Image (cartoon, rainbow, N blue to C red):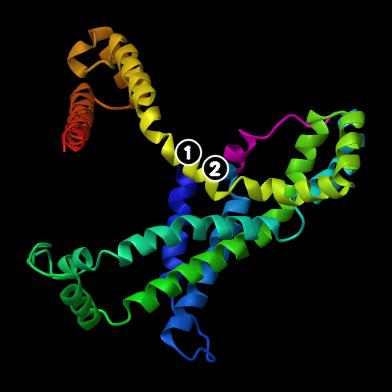
Amino acid sequence: MKWMTAGVSIAALAIATPLAAQDVETEAELEAEETEMAGAMLGAMLGENEEFQKFVDLFKPEPLTPDQEARLPLATQVVGAMIPDGTMGEVLSSMFRDIVDPLAALEDGDQIGTASSMLGWYVGEGDIDEAAAAEIVAIIDPSREAREAATMDAIEKGIADIMLVMEPAIREAMAKAFAASFDDTELTDIGAFFATPSGAAFAAKSYKLASDPSIFVGMLENLPEMMGPIMAAVAEGEKAIEALPKAKAFADLSATERARLASLSGLTEQELEEAMSAEDMEEAAEDAAEAEEWDS
């Protein structure tokens, strides 16, 4: 989309443009300021971009009815009990750590693989033991663990900072969804339940439970059983798609269709043939690359 391309271009330009700041002590601080400035510029651009607004409008729900608007204060109280301030940042940061930390521990336990990759795989995993591998890693990249820890800390902080901005808007959107989904009696009953000790405990934990490790593990444990139905659905979809007529190549077009396309596009018939042939070659290359990826 044009707005995405423009956004990336502005961000890249902003990052590449030196700031006239005199109080910046290090290159890292300068880069951080430039990145923050790029983000602000991109955000401002998106906020004013008509194509982006049209994209957002595609997903906007119907406006609330007068009755639903009247329920909004009650729905806001219910959502506020479910998502107190700071909850979303805490939940997503916790979810990030719950997923990333075990993966990082797994990678840290594979010192042989890490050492082999650092040496460009010239040393096979069977040629060195864990002690030798750990020493190789320490020599080549003594700050590796500290750098990775700093990276994870920065990402976690970034998640919390993003959620600090997003949480009020999400809470407001949820309140509107609740006002549209529940009537006065239901919202009152839910609010009354949340006012009890058990209800308060449920309200405080309900959002966090979505990231509970047991749920994530449950999904992973069932993944092998899910693969069969998933692949069957993919196969059925491919069969249905294969049965449909494919897009016409230039050679498939009638003289009338070629003339009409030329009139519509402003291209000559020769230019049309060249353009459509290039498109066909590109699609064929993509299909071949996909097939090779599946085979490997």
Place residue 246 in its image quadrant: top left
Residue 111 lies within the magenta run: no
- Which labelled disc corresponds to residue 22? none
Question: Nearest the camera: 40 or 171?
Answer: 171
Place residue 249 in its image quadrant: top left
Does the rendering let one see residue 9?
no
Does the rendering let one see residue 140?
yes
- Report the magenta residues as a range: 53-64
Marks 1/2 in contact by CB < 8 Å: the verdict is yes
Left or right: residue 206 versus residue 259 is right
Against 216, residue 62 (above or below) is: above
Question: Nearest the camera: 12 or 125?
Answer: 125
x 37%, y 20%: residue = 233
Left or right: residue 64 versus residue 4 is right
The residue wearing badge 1 is 219
> Which quadrant of the rendered structure holds the N terminus?
top left
Three-letter code, disc 1: Met
Circle 2 crowding by C-alpha within 10 Å: few under 14, some 14–19, many from 20:
few
Against 95, residue 160 (above or below) is: below
Looking at the rendered structure, the secondary structure element under dot 1 is: helix
Question: Nearest the camera: 136 or 25?
Answer: 136
Number of dots carrying numbers: 2
- Which labelled disc corresponds to residue 215? 2
x 50%, y 70%: residue = 154
- Give the alpha-carbon distance from disc 1 to disc 2, as whole Å: 6 Å
Q: Position of residue 76 (x, y in %)?
A: 84, 45
Against 135, residue 220 (above or below) is: above
Circle 1 crowding by C-alpha within 10 Å: few under 14, some 14–19, many from 20:
few
> Which quadrant of the rendered structure holds the C terminus?
top left
Three-letter code, disc 2: Ile
Question: Nearest the camera: 241 or 104?
Answer: 104
